[in-house]
Amino acid sequence: MAKPNTLFDTTALDNGRSPLADRMRPRTLEEYEGQRQIIGVGTILREALERDEIPSMIFWGPPGTGKTTLAKIIAETTKANFVLFSAVSGTVKDIREVIATAADRRKLYGERTILFVDEIHRFNKAQQDAFLPAVEGGTIVLIGATTENPSFEVNSALLSRCRVFVLEMLGIEDLVAILRRAIVDKERGFGELGLAVEDDAVEYLAMMSNGDARVALNALELAASTSKARNSSNADSSNAGRFPLTPGITRERIADALQKTHLLYDRAGEEHYNVISALHKSMRGSDANASLYWLGRMLEAGEDPLYVARRLVRFASEDIGLADPNALVQAVAAFQASHQMGMPECNVVLAQCVAYLARAPKSNALYVAYQKVQRDIRELPTEPVPIHLRNAPTKLMKDIGYGKDYKYTPDFDRLEDAKQDYLPERLQGKKYLD
């Protein structure tokens, strides 16, 4: 029985091959696109790599920006043993086994081990603590990858022993270069197919991939696999045994591929900011119905619920503040619940929070007050702490006047009797919050 004549059945799109995004993973820094701020010539990481003095580090950035790829390139460049470890399925016992093996390799062969921990923010404190002795003693070089702020998700002891590098969403130019390489690469990409992809389609895919190379390559692969090859009945015999000719991949086919992999929602571009702005302004305007609609637009399109939750926490203080202090309690609870539950379970949690914030009374007094503070700190000299407010834990400090004449408020029956200045002399009488 003859096989259907489609792109999916050609060697370059064989079911037995790994996904295009995996095949096209850069193998050297020369192939690596983007992140010039951390691996460009003269950067700290580039120089450390050239000196073969790689520290333990945390890569923090959005999905598809090259965190795993960069770790693998570092391991290959330094000729270190590379161990990939998932924080989703790994246990403390697994960690200890990896560290024991790394210690043996170091002792017997003088070989270093780079332990790459994907989604390190998913490890609890006990699991993270298990890395400490090995990192401190040099048994392993730890490279953790996270999409979450490591200040909150990585414990301070481990974080203090690692250098944090921030990876940014890939630019459109970077994604265009990645896509064009995949189209022409005969070994790992679609070069053997002579795949024709319109320039407009490449630019559109790069723009709509949210700075995520994986999304871009997956959509390209889906568009290619669903493109019909030239009907075999129209092919002359001289073409037998060769790859079938393919029609051009258009912008419309790319859009169709994106819709099949995820709702078309530009999380990195203008539409992303338009929708979050619409949510923010709808809540500020106390329109709960519109607020719920814009929330749904984001969540159903695959937006990170924690991104939304963080914005709600900010809104609770910036736009509501002291008008309803319980708004912050509601927003923080929604963030914590979303972190623990994830989608789709947390959608109603966020909906509850959005409705509460929309209906709450509004005040931006705190936001305005803090802006005034920021301006004074930026534009005025750094003022010394008034001497009566300084702590005096030693005799010397007491002798030179630290804490002298400070009025301890609980000692006074009336608050006005304990009145004293708390701002520096230059700012006395200044009012930030009306």
Image (spheres, rainbow, N blue to C red):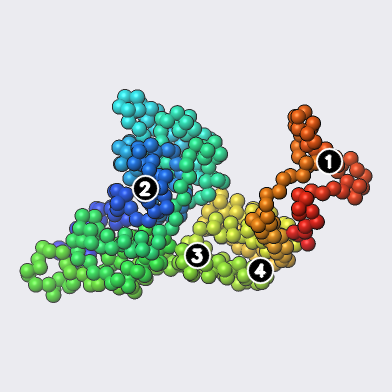
Which of the image's four quarters has the N terminus? bottom left
Left or right: 178 in relation to 164 = left
Residue 122: where, in percent of width, then height?
A: 50, 45
Label 2 vs 3, first from the N-terminus: 2
Depicted 396 relative to depicted 221: above or below? above
Task: Find residue 255 and report its image quarter.
Answer: bottom left
Farthest top residue?
108
Give the class, few, some or many, for how many residues have Cα within 10 Å of label 3's Cα (few <14, many ≥20): some
Contact check, label 4 and label 2, Cβ < 8 Å? no
Q: CA distance from mark 1 to mark 3?
A: 57 Å
Q: Are marks 2 and 1 in contact (CB under 8 Å)?
A: no
Query: Dot 3 lies on which element?
Result: helix
Which residue lies under the disc numbered 3?
Answer: 300
62 or 97, nearer to the observer = 62
The kind of residue tagged 1 is Tyr
Q: Earlier in the sequence, mark 4 or mark 1?
A: 4
What's the mark number on residue 284? 4
Q: Secondary structure at mark 2?
A: helix
User: What mark, if any, has residue 260 been given in the picture?
Assistant: none
Residue found 33% across the figure and 36% down from its top: 80
The image shows residue 135 at horizontal and vertical percentages of 45, 33
Whether the residues at callouts 1 and 3 have beta carbons within 8 Å, the answer is no
In this view, the mark in front (1 or 3): 1
Residue contact between numbered discs 3 and 4, judged by CB atoms under 8 Å: no
**Identity, as a three-letter code, of the amino acid under mark 4:** Arg
Residues packed near mark 4 inside 10 Å, few (<14), some (14 to 19) or many (20 plus): many
**Which residue is under mark 1?**
406
Quarter of the rendering occupied by the C terminus? bottom right
Name the residue tied to disc 2.
70
Q: Residue 281, percent across and down?
A: 62, 70
First reached walking from the N terminus: tag 1 or tag 3: 3
Q: What is the spatial separation of the Cα atoms under label 4 and label 1, in whole angstroms?
A: 43 Å
